[in-house]
Amino acid sequence: MHRSKPGAGWVRGGVVFAAVLAFLGTVAARSDEPKPLPPAFTGAPLKAAAKAVQKQVDADLPALDTLYKQLHAQPELSYKEERTAGRLAKEMKALGFEVAEKVGGHGLVCVLKNGAGPTILVRTDMDGLPVTENTGVPYASKVRTRDKNDVEVGVMHACGHDMHMACWVGTARVLTAMKDRWSGTLVFIAQPAEEVGAGARLMLADGLYQKFPKPDYALALHCDTLRKVGEIGYSEGLAMANVDTVDIVVKGKGGHGAAPHTTVDPVVLAARIVLDLQTLVSREIDPLEPAVVTVGSIHGGSKHNIIPAEVKLQLTVRSTKDAVRKHILEGIARIAKAAAVSARAPEPSVTVNTDEFTPALFNDPALTRRTMAVFKEVLGEKAVNPRPTIMGGEDFSRYAQGGVPVCLFWLGTISEERYAESQREGGKPLPSSHSEFYAPEPEGSLKTGVATLSLAVLSLCGK
């Protein structure tokens, strides 16, 4: 995750939770009434639109496949998406969109007006992950770069943002080719820094809803690593969790490993804190309320026989309710400080990075229900299935700001053969998102992704 010196966006010490809780009440405030949905898009109009969309997708598939593989092979880390943004800007300008670049970093806002009608935002994300690819596909990423800590890392689109971008471009191509079938304004945005939970906030802060047409609806898709191609998953209402990033610096008194009685050992103290943090969920939160506290990183010391002066812990915290979030964040500080008191150690530093907070994703029920009805009619009932709330985070949630109904759905990306293998006893399991082994099946993913995203838009502004 991108971090500079503690300053703007960082809240430290005793004021951390008051600031976080004040922030909590404003991140997803809804001040406007959502626009009523247009009449249902079904029957003969939907069938005609679906047929026209599929014709466009089939004609464009070879070019989209090439684009996808080029994007896959050339990923860029969060905040560094300059080349990727440039490629997408070129594609959208060629289609006739008005393109604004460097919105909230390397973000793009691409606007196409086509008469009176609703304004529809369609988002893609652009950033890759610091993962060394191990998929074995011919177009695998071989990119290596230096991360924010100046450590050399591999870079990979292990979360499917390459597929998101290709489907986004494909949808723009379909809709520009079918301008006679819809009326309204398209706002296609390419967002940076989704993997660190910052890009949506940065684009909104840079005037996304003030400088450009404010959407009546916002749509996005996301790759599903566990679902077959040709299938769609969805969540009505709560879809994904709140995400908080917390850093703890455990402080002690360093010295010689052979004389621990002359020190205050922060390694032992950090181990105690790690174990005690587990009781926040297991003993303080209602078992029926989803919550996660994970210590993902622990660093301290430099040599076998030296007791260090401090140990650093990095935590991710997941919750679905504001009250649970408040309790956990307060509890982390309480546990860390209590452990220090018990060991006569200096008070630890507890830091929450509000810049990387991602609010829970709440899919507008009416918009989601309507969109899935379209998909079911085109793909069949069995291909469109509910997906339970997951504890992952997605800053697409922020586009609900000001009462905008949002809907993010899940795109199946696993080939039939690969899925069948995973279901056999002893078969090779499917990779998770962010895995070095994850690569979508290109053709089926592109076909379904472009068709569904295009129809989702047409269902809101089609003639």
Image (cartoon, rainbow, N blue to C red):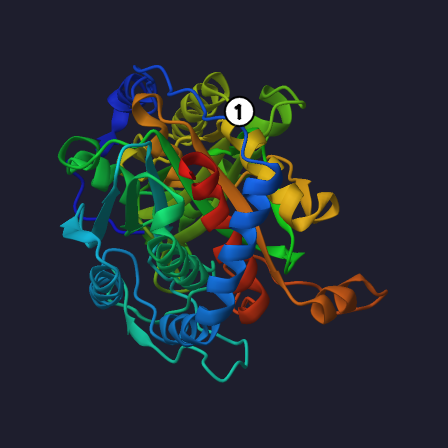
Q: Amino acid at mark 1?
A: Ala
Q: Which image quarter holds the C terminus?
A: top left
Is residue 108 visible to the viewer in this orientation of the structure?
A: yes
Label 1 packing within 10 angstroms: few (<14), some (14-19), many (20+): some
Locate residue 334: give its quadrant. top left
Vertical order, 165 against 2 (above or below)? below
124 on left or right of 382: left
Vertical order, 368 against 36 (above or below)? below
State the image coordinates of residue 125 (x, y, percent, origin top left). Answer: 35, 53
State the image coordinates of residue 442 (x, y, percent, origin top left). Answer: 53, 70
Q: Residue furthest right?
A: 425
Instruction: Give the residue at x 48% y 57%.
Output: 450
Vertical order, 77 against 376 (above or below)? below
Locate residue 30: give its quadrant. top left
SS of the residue under disc 1? helix
Instruction: Give the residue at x 22% y 41%.
Output: 203
